[in-house]
Image: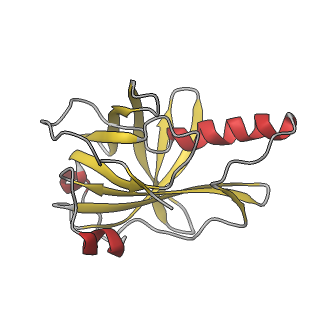
Amino acid sequence: MFYHTMMGCKSSSPLPGSVVLVLVLLLSLSATCDSFSGGGSAPSFLETGDCADFDIMEDFDIDRYTGSWYTILSIPSSYVHINSCNQYSIKRIKHRMQLNSLGFNERGNRQRQRAVLSRVKTEEGTYYETKSKGVPAVPYHIFASDYDSYACIYSCLGIIGLRAELYWVLSRNTTLQQEKIQYC
């Protein structure tokens, strides 16, 4: 199941800043640990197993990826703070990207988040990870994009045989053609 996060949103000019797509993931895992220790149940997006193997797009062009993006679809999570009308502003700073996000939480209140995406090269492959103040780094895989209309994002954090997977379909506009959504 996915959220249609732009439904009911008004189109506006690009907002300054960018977004922390995966900051929410870490907050979610922190809350999950609290719920396990308190006898609660795991959130619906937490599953057993390992994360999928993804590399970023071959010949990924950081300059073409920067600019404004809107979340069209995302995996629902009770711990995701921005769950509607989410607009990202992505700006290149040397070899990294600054992400600022602005949208609304489930109560209809404006919510902002900020993070930095850095490229990581390992023996297993290359990917980006998000870093935010007081939060460990989280993988951010840009696995498909034409840079002009859509981007497909996968994030997963695995801990002790559990994984928290999140997906996003981003668009340069507040809407996106169905075939591009299905492609992601």
In the image, 147 versus 150, the foreground residue is 150
Q: Could you tell whether 142 is left or right of 77 in the image?
A: left
Residue 16, visible in the rendered structure: yes
Question: What is the quadrant of the C terminus in the image?
Answer: bottom left
Q: Position of residue 122 (x, y in %)?
A: 54, 62
In the image, 83 versus 53, the foreground residue is 83
Q: Could you tell whether 121 is left or right of 73 in the image?
A: right
Quadrant of the image occupied by residue 49? bottom right
Q: Position of residue 36 (x, y in %)?
A: 82, 41
Q: Could you tell whether 16 is left or right of 35 in the image?
A: left
Farthest residue to the top: give it: 109
Q: What residue is shown at x 62% (from left), y 40% (from top)?
A: 28
Image color mode = secondary structure
Residue 93, visible in the rendered structure: no
Q: Position of residue 57 (x, y in %)?
A: 35, 68
Q: What residue is shown at x 28% (from left), y 40% (from top)?
A: 87
Q: Position of residue 72 (x, y in %)?
A: 32, 54
Q: What residue is shown at x 57% (from left), y 67% (from top)?
A: 123
Farthest residue to the front: give it: 8
In the image, 148 versus 54, the foreground residue is 148
- Numbered-mark total: 0
For residue 70, above or below residue 20: below
In the image, 7 versus 37, the foreground residue is 7
Q: What residue is shown at x 25% (from left), y 48% (from top)?
A: 69
